[in-house]
């Protein structure tokens, strides 16, 4: 039994210890907002927060997050819209939308440690998230729009470097 | 027709897409009256539109939403004429039925940048007919003449200023006859069309609730991964599933046509099971394929004349007589679509029915194929179109290979099952943009005018063996192989385009912008080479050959002006231009590049001018231009699927890289004001970007890039040359 906490809810899971967090979230917990894109930490579609840090859940064994706080896109937007999601709406960022949960989770993690990132900061922090539809320019615009609006997440106060 | 309509109604009601108490406009009526002897597109307000008592407007969209914004564009067309409250409009996917077919292919299909082009009038008529019926119903209730009423924001406004909400008269309106020729607004009175409205699907796409095919949930749903051979089309000689079956969670291992499926309670168990599956493969006929050898063979083939696609004047004679000839050869690789959502399909096959959940671009194909595989009549197959995590053509595969695979697995196990392709399966498992080779020759006369142009193309036909074969292969020429070359706009008196279609047997299909994805590079590279030989400015040189092509000139001038064409750039930087028409839209791009110390290039900025006729939503057009540029640039810089012994050498985004945020150029989009009929927008930004960039590299370095990708992974790569 592996104890994990996802979006504030505690679970005891009977799954193999090496099962990637991604598939625990999607198949065991039924939270499908977190996406599978590559399975090899190459695309960022599976990005979630573990204790406030952005991690690629496809290469994170569930045993590694035992007892930690996991937040997925569903947890980010409840209750209500997160300021980063609001910025995404205002910039009308998504095309197909498949990469967007991962993009948003990476952006929130960036803004939590760097509330006013420069273009270069954004490019560096977001380079791990592929958007095959090419929404990068609007993503950048949305991150600038959300600058300074991101509050702390449990386990990781805003503004503190990793 | 009434059958189709009632089937659709049942589907709508059953699907719960609309509230039961609401009303589907015009449903009790026969299909809109056809005027005998006048061929026109039928419209059916009843099948596309529902107005509830609560004023909610539901639009049943007959197109797949794969990022191109069609769940917003189609509702905008209807809402414009309906005069409803845009805030009350929502889009839901239509079921499969003949009335939803794409008039261009006769199939319910999304592709070829056709959605707005084919639905521009039909959907507006749907809105206009509904509006007229609502006005009649409201006028009748108020005892006034319909002509004395007007509409605005979802209300019928009566003489004297009182108003009746649409929802209040929707039921009464539904009993009225559908006007056969509803009057459409003049474009000058549009209030929605041409406005940058936000997409209707954005909220669900930022909160994680948008459901893609891979997110399909059903009670007891199993997940399967299919092991396929290392060579496409390889077959199973024998297999040993002992270890796979021992993996906890694995429930079945079954053989299907293309391989062996491991069925499990979830993805991870299926993956673990597949990893330990032992299979002896017969590699089959493609085991000898290698892209290196193929390229050499294509180059040899290009020395001899092919089947003629266009022949103006006498190009061969003019070339022979020309005192100044230019020759160049271009190579383009196989490309994968690499939609970010790997292919997948969910099937619930029962004795007398089959339900499919798929992010498909081809609902009719999907349904008919499932019917033939299961022996069920087509009306027993139900297709649920989910959101598509990228399409780019892949999900419109003419053989719907990802659906076939899932239906075959379902046939074996008779339980609801979702077949997921891993990224590696998706990359290696077939259907690519073909490998292309082009040999081009141009000739000048004594006065330096271009008098001859010959463009010879070598590459596999994508239409052969598909439902498109009849309409797209004419006189031995696959029109999609030569599109953009056959229509080369440059005014040159002697012009020859011919084609060889070798048959290496690779699984090939359309890839965003189809044939234009290679002809754009060839034509716009070669015209630049001619400008260079003529000693002319590439922009002015193009202008001189386009005097009768005002829309080409329009985007060319606009992009050049906005980019500051002609200004001097610092050393190590270059600026290139390319202009191309596809799908009835005209795009010019000016790219700026900087040479980096590592011998690579950075694309700093792309100025993009587009003339796509009348616009539906400029914000979506801007997004499609940006996205098309990223897509085309990914291919231009990195994209290549290569084969060795029939084996695809690429696996994932490490060896099939796509553009990332840190390489994103600044893209500026300028839209030409136009009253021309709408052109396509989803694909049309792709063709010019590669040549704009390689022409810029030439401007910066004096070296021509004639082989894509720019960072070639094979020996003689461009970055090596740059450093030489
Ligand atoms: S799925 Fe995890 S990084 Fe791509
Ligand atoms: S919006 Fe389609 S992959 Fe990013």
Image: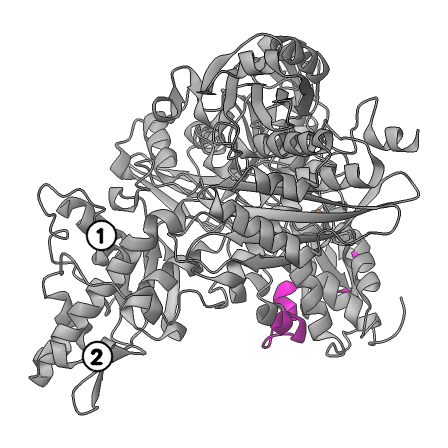
Q: Is residue B662 above or below residue B404?
A: below
Residue at the farthest front position = B447
Residue B91 spot, x, y in % from top left: 39, 61
| Image quadrant in which the N terminus of chain A is located | bottom right
Read off the chain for label 1: B
Helix, strand or loop at label 2? It is: strand
Residue A121 spot, x, y in % from top left: 83, 63
The reply to whether residue B79 is visible in this rendering is no
Comparing labels 2 and 1, the label whose residue is closer to the camera:
2
Between residue B447 and residue B704, name the one nearer to us. Answer: B447
- In the image, the segment drawn in magenta is A65-87
Instruction: Identify the residue under disc 2.
Output: B150
Asked whether mark 2 and ligand 2 are closer than 8 Å, the reply comes as no
| Image quadrant in which the C terminus of chain A is located | bottom right
Instruction: Identify the residue under disc 1.
Output: B43
Helix, strand or loop at label 1? It is: loop
Asked whether mark 1 and ligand 2 are closer than 8 Å, the reply comes as no
Residue B72 spot, x, y in % from top left: 43, 61
Whether residue B594 sits left or right of residue B554 in the image: it is right
Q: Residue at x 15, y 66 (%)?
A: B174
Residue B723 counted in the magenta span: no
Residue A70 counted in the magenta span: yes
The reply to whether residue B538 is visible in this rendering is yes
Q: Residue at x 71, y 68 (%)?
A: A143
Q: Is residue B391 above or below residue B414?
A: below
Q: How packed is label 2: few (under 14 Cα within 10 Å), some, or many (20 or more)? A: some
Between residue A72 and residue B385, name the one nearer to us. Answer: B385
> How was the colour assigned to the protein in this rendering?
one colour
Quarter of the image for residue A125 reads bottom right
Q: How packed is label 1: few (under 14 Cα within 10 Å), some, or many (20 or more)? A: many
Q: Is residue B513 above or below residue A155?
A: above
Instruction: State the separation of the CA atoms marked 2 and 1.
Output: 23 Å
């Amino acid at each position: 039994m592996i104890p994990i906490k996802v979006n504030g809810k505690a679970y005891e899971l009977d799954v193999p210890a090496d099962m990637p967090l991604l598939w625990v979230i999607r198949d065991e917990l039924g939270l499908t907002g977190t996406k599978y894109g590559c399975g090899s930490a190459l695309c960022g579609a599976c990005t979630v927060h573990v204790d406030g840090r952005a991690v690629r859940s496809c290469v994170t064994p569930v045993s590694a997050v035992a007892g930690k706080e996991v937040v997925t896109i569903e947890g980010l937007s409840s209750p209500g819209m997160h300021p980063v999601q609001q910025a995404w709406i205002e910039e009308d960022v998504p095309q197909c939308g498949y990469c967007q949960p991962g993009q948003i989770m990476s952006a929130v993690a960036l803004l939590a440690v760097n509330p006013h990132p420069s273009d270069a900061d954004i490019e560096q922090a977001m380079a791990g998230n592929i958007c095959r539809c090419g929404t990068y320019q609007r993503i950048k615009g949305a991150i600038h729009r959300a600058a300074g609006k991101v509050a702390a997440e449990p386990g990781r106060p805003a503004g503190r470097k990793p | 027709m009434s059958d189709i309509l009632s089937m659709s109604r049942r589907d709508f009601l059953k699907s719960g897409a609309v509230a039961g108490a609401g009303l589907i406009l015009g449903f009790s009526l026969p299909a809109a009256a056809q005027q005998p002897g006048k061929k026109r597109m039928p419209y059916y307000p009843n099948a596309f539109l529902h107005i509830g008592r609560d004023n909610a407007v539901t639009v049943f969209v007959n197109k797949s939403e794969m990022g191109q914004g069609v769940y917003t564009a189609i509702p905008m067309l209807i809402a414009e004429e309906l005069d409803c409250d845009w805030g009350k409009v929502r889009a839901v996917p239509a079921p499969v039925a003949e009335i939803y077919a794409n008039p261009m292919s006769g199939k319910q299909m999304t592709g070829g940048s056709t959605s707005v082009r084919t639905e521009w009038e039909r959907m507006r008529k749907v809105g206009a007919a509904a509006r007229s019926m609502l006005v009649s119903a409201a006028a009748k209730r108020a005892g006034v003449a319909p002509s004395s009423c007007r509409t605005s924001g979802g209300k019928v406004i009566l003489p004297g200023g009182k108003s009746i909400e649409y929802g209040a008269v929707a039921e009464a309106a539904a009993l009225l006859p559908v006007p056969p020729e509803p009057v459409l607004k003049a474009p000058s009175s549009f209030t929605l069309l041409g406005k940058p409205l936000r997409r209707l699907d954005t909220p669900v796409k930022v909160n994680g609730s948008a459901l893609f095919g891979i997110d399909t949930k059903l009670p007891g749903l199993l997940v399967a991964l299919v092991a396929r051979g290392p060579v496409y089309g390889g077959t199973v000689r024998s297999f040993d599933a002992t270890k796979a079956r021992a993996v906890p969670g694995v429930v079945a291992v079954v053989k299907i046509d293309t391989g062996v499926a491991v069925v499990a309670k979830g993805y991870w168990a299926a993956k673990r099971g597949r990893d330990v599956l032992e299979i002896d493969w017969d590699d089959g006929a493609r085991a000898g394929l290698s892209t290196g050898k193929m390229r050499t063979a294509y180059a040899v083939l290009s020395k001899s004349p092919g089947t003629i696609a266009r022949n103006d004047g006498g190009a061969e004679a003019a070339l022979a007589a020309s005192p100044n000839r230019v020759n160049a050869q271009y190579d383009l690789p196989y490309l994968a679509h690499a939609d970010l959502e790997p292919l997948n399909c969910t099937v619930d096959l029962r004795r007398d029915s089959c339900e499919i959940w798929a992010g498909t671009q081809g609902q009719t194909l999907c349904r008919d194929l499932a019917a033939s595989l299961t022996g069920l009549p087509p009306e027993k197959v139900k297709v649920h179109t989910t959101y598509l995590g990228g399409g780019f053509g892949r999900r419109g595969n003419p053989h719907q290979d990802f659906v076939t695979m899932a239906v075959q697995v379902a046939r074996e196990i008779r339980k609801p099952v979702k077949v997921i392709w891993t990224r590696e399966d998706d990359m290696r498992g077939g259907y690519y943009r073909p490998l292309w080779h082009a040999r081009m020759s141009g000739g000048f006369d004594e006065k330096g005018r271009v008098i001859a142009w010959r463009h010879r193309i070598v590459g596999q036909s994508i239409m052969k063996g598909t439902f498109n074969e009849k309409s797209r292969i004419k006189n031995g020429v696959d029109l999609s192989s030569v599109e953009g070359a056959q229509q080369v706009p440059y005014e040159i008196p002697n012009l020859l385009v011919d084609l060889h279609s070798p048959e290496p047997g690779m699984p090939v299909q359309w890839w965003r912008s189809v044939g234009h994805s290679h002809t754009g590079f060839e034509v716009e590279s070669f015209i630049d080479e001619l400008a260079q030989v003529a000693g002319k400015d590439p922009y002015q040189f193009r202008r001189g050959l386009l005097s009768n092509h005002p829309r080409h000139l329009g985007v060319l001038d606009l992009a050049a002006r906005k980019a500051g064409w002609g200004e001097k750039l610092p050393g190590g930087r270059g600026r290139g231009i390319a202009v191309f028409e596809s799908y009835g839209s005209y795009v010019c791009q000016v790219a700026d590049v900087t040479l980096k110390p590592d011998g690579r290039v950075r694309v700093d900025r792309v100025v993009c001018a587009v003339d796509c006729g009348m616009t539906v939503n400029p914000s979506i057009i801007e997004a499609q231009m940006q996205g098309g540029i990223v897509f085309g640039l990914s291919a231009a810089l990195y994209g290549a699927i290569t084969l060795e012994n029939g084996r695809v050498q690429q696996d994932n985004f490490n060896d099939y890289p796509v553009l990332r945020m840190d390489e994103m150029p600044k893209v500026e989009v300028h839209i030409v004001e136009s009253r021309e009929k709408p052109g396509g927008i989803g694909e049309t930004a792709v063709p010019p970007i590669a040549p704009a960039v390689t022409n810029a590299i030439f401007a910066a370095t004096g070296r021509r890039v004639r082989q894509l990708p720019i960072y070639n992974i094979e020996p003689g790569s461009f970055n090596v040359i740059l450093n030489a």
